[in-house]
Amino acid sequence: MNRLVDHAEHDDITMLLPWYANGTLNEADRQRVDQHLATCGQCSDELSLCYEMQNATLADGAIPIPPAASASAIIGRRDWRSRFGFLGDRRTQRIAAVLAAVGLLFVLGMMQLSPTELPNQRFTATTSAGASDSMDYVLELRFSSGVSQAARSKILQELGGTAQPVGEADDVYAVLMNLPPQSLSDLDQLARDFAARDEIETAQFVALQVPVR
Amino acid sequence: MDDDRERQLLARVARGEHDAFDEVFRAYHPLLFRFVFKMTASYRLADEVANDILLIVWQTASKFRGDSKVSTWIFGIAYRQSLRRLGKRRLKTVPLFDSAAVDEQSASRMEREDWVRQAIALLPPKQRLTIMLVYYLGLTCDEAAKASDVPINTVKTRMFHARRKLRGYLGDQS
Ligand SMILES: [Zn+2]
């Protein structure tokens, strides 16, 4: 038996073990791992841990039965969004703005009625607002790693162009977005939509800039 | 469901066909629910995130570039959405693996598998999610890299570091 372990081979094989365990290695790699395992005790130990992790991950005993959800409920809940926002036509935006303004006033009213229970503590509205055509929302955006500066600029342009870096990190920006008044849940959804893009790691509306009268 | 079938379905979803989306929904919702539940241990959050993931599938089906399997693309959305939520949520995890806190007897009572499961829960979100992609969803290295939008070597390294950390938590030698 060969007692001399090839270190480069060992490093390679160690990295492949999770996929040896989950059975998705191609035939050539699987044979390489088999050969190496015959001579390397350390990789055999590592493989045991891989199997343990796999078993722990797969055990489904404690998982409750998912709620009875339906596709139509999800689509119906937010399908109107596709006709609203930046993509919608002017007239639709107007109508939506009025509806959203009513919602926002309601929320702001709630905030005043129960100051100890803010509906959403992330938002810091320092003045009260009347219904207005549009408002400035601050979106905090973190780009995924590896997104080029050009791609970032393009996205920031798309979002209105008023952006500045936040803190030390060069991948986080505060973007000022001028939108028709939105309800908090709409803003959350909008942020989620941004975060769903490949280039964007996280997106969150963190503040609301209200005109001082 | 095979990938060809899923591609056809997704193309129809992109055209706004509700019954195609219904089929995708029924195929994926239970799996996505379990996927998120395993990481958050929250019924409400699992339901919410599973629905969010599928809503994004509905809204962005036309952006599917076809350079991966449909399932990998959906798991990529699941990865990002879960990461968002896990990042925000400070899980109440007791450092069970502080050797001083666990006496011999309770240690032997606890099944090793439970130890491993709880130790996994202590790992950083990206490592946990990668473990879920590989061991729970059974993705290949390449698919896991695509789903988490990182190079293949990053996925390998995450899995490697997860094992190092886990050994630390579990008090294993080596
Ligand atoms: Zn080895």
Image: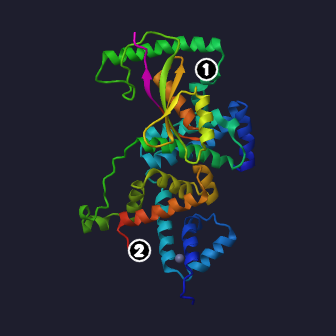
Percent of width and height locating residue A30: 64, 72
Camera-nearest residue between B105 and A103: A103
Question: Which residue carries the number 2 mark?
Answer: B174
Percent of width and height locating residue B42: 42, 42
Image-based side of A126 in relation to B28, left or right:
left
Range covered by the magenta-colored residues = A205-213
* Residue B108, quarter of picture: bottom left
Image-based side of A42 in relation to A152, left or right:
left
Query: What label sits on residue B36 in the rendered view?
Result: none
Give the residue type at disc 1.
Phe
Image-based side of A207 in relation to B69, left or right:
left
* Residue at the (54%, 20%) spot, across then down: A179
Image-based side of B20 in relation to A42, left or right:
right
Q: Quadrant of the C terminus of chain B?
A: bottom left
* Residue at the (52%, 31%) spot, across then down: A191
Question: Which residue carries the number 1 mark?
Answer: A84
| Image: A27 above or below B84 | below
Name the subunit of mark 2.
Answer: B
Verify whether residue A206 appears in magenta.
yes
Element on which disc 2 rests: loop
